[in-house]
Every structure is written in structure tokens, then in C-alpha cells.
Image (cartoon, rainbow, N blue to C red):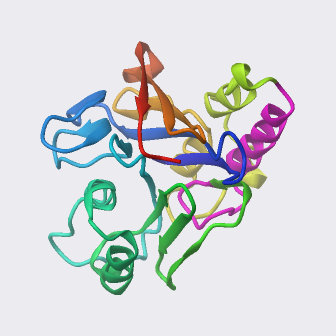
Amino acid sequence: MCLLAFDWQPQTLTPLRLIGNRDEFHDRPTQALHDWKDAPIVGGRDLQAGGSWLAVNRLTGRVATLTNVRDPDLITPPGTPSRGELVHQALTCPNLEDWLQQLHNEAHQHAGFNLLVATPHTLWHMHRGRENITLGRVSEGLHVVSNANLDTPWPKAVDLREAMLADRQTPSADWPHHALRAIQQRREAPSDAVPDTGIAPALEKKLSAAFIVGESYGTRATTWLTAHQGGSISITEQSFGPMGVPRGDISLTLETAWA
């Protein structure tokens, strides 16, 4: 993922609502939202490296997703493993806290990332940046993350958070009405508000849009998920081709042990 927003309310009927965009090269082989045959996982899959950008353990209800951290000065070792594999591992490891602590100790071996892992009672966030590696529990409420640290106020992240706030005021059946419009907004940020992550200004401006349109690179999927207190998890994914052309929707509902 390259843009995520989520509302973490563990004591409510809908403990987690989450929506995100996956930006990627269009020629990278991908399988859309599905039930994996080789693991108890439901989610999209990167067929080049085998990982995912957002997925659910269909037995436990554990949810995992990540964004890349964009920082040309963040040096990673040769042969760095795919960050999408972290989603797979987070969903299948037998002891999540032990695995997170081990990853925290070894995160310098990976390219930059934000990893989110939700259980019925705790939402974890790990940030692997150039200056630090942090691991902690996420506080209740609305949060956003793009290609910097959690809640960094990039324009598209701020807009998406405001849309999530508006969705709080609408009937739950309408979710994600406002957030979906915001996360699929193709408008670029004003030049004086574009983040500076160290890449070329023209590319920085293009990537400032929530929904990125391009022939070779752009937003390939919008995914949203709702975890319900009784254990049901609903997930929908919209897929897109080059220049943002829609390629269909998939919706699934899972009955899990999330309770």
C-alpha cells in the first residue's frame, strides 16, 4: 500500500475500518483478492515475490497491511527481501508479539516500511525509517499513513483523514462513502504543499495525488475492510489497469475467530 487510513475502535461493534491504495508498476504480476490455497489467508497477492499488501487470516481474523517508506537516502543491503512477505509472516506466525520483536531487531535488513497488524484487542505499528525503527501499539481513533511515518500530515493523508471523519457521521451501511471518494481523488497537491522526500520534484508532485494515474505505474487497487465485533470481516477490492481503467470489484465476507 501507499496510502492507508483506519479507524481503530476496539470496544465498539466495528473495531476496525480500514481503506488503502496500492500503487505499483502495472506490469508486476498480481492476483486480486482471493482465498489463498497454500495458507489460511485472504487477500491480494504479488505473484512476483509471493507476499501481499493487505490480507486477513481467515481463521483468526488477524489483519495485516503495510506501506513502503519513500526515502532515497535509506540504504538497504543487497538482496533485500520483499516487504510484502512481512504481511504473510505477520498473519501466519504462531506468536505475534515474539515475531514483531524479532522483526524489530532485524528490520534494518529491509527497505523502509510501515507495518500494521490488528488483532481483536491490539493494533500494532512498526516503522522502519532511515533515522529509527519503532514498534508500538496504536492508540484508539483515526490514523493515516502514506510513505512516511504514521500520521505524517501529507496533503493526501490529511484529506483522507477528514473524509474518514465525515464517514463517522454517516450510517455504517454507507461506509466508505466519503473515504472512497477521497482515496480515489486524482488531483495533485499544490506545488507549495508537495512533500520533499528526495526524489525529482515532477515525480514528487505526481505521487502527491491520492490516486495515481500512469501508463506504467499507478494505483492498481483500492481495498477497504471492516472487522465486526462478532467475528465477521468484510473486505472489498477494486482493481485498476494502466491510466486508472477499472478492472472489476471483488467482495468477500469471512467468519473468523475475531471476537
Q: Residue at x 72, y 46 (%)?
A: 12
Query: Depth check: 234 or 33 in front?
Result: 234
191 sits to left or right of 243: right
Q: Position of residue 130 (x, y in %)?
A: 46, 80
Q: Residue at x 47, y 21 (%)?
A: 244
Q: Position of residue 45 (x, y in %)?
A: 26, 38
Tell me the magenta residue range. 145-170
Quarter of the view holding residue 137: bottom right
Q: Position of residue 144 (x, y in %)?
A: 66, 53
Residue 147 covered by magenta stretch: yes
Q: Position of residue 201 (x, y in %)?
A: 57, 54
Q: How many marks?
A: 0
Quarter of the view holding residue 54: top left
Residue 157 covered by magenta stretch: yes
Looking at the picture, does residue 116 appear above or below residue 76? above
Quarter of the view holding residue 83: bottom left
89 sits to left or right of 258: left
Looking at the picture, does residue 152 appear above or below residue 51? below
Q: Residue at x 64, y 47 (%)?
A: 15
Q: Which residue appears farthest toward the right when viewing the image?
A: 169
79 sits to left or right of 238: left
Looking at the picture, does residue 186 appear above or below residue 38? above
Query: Depth check: 182 or 116 in front?
Result: 116
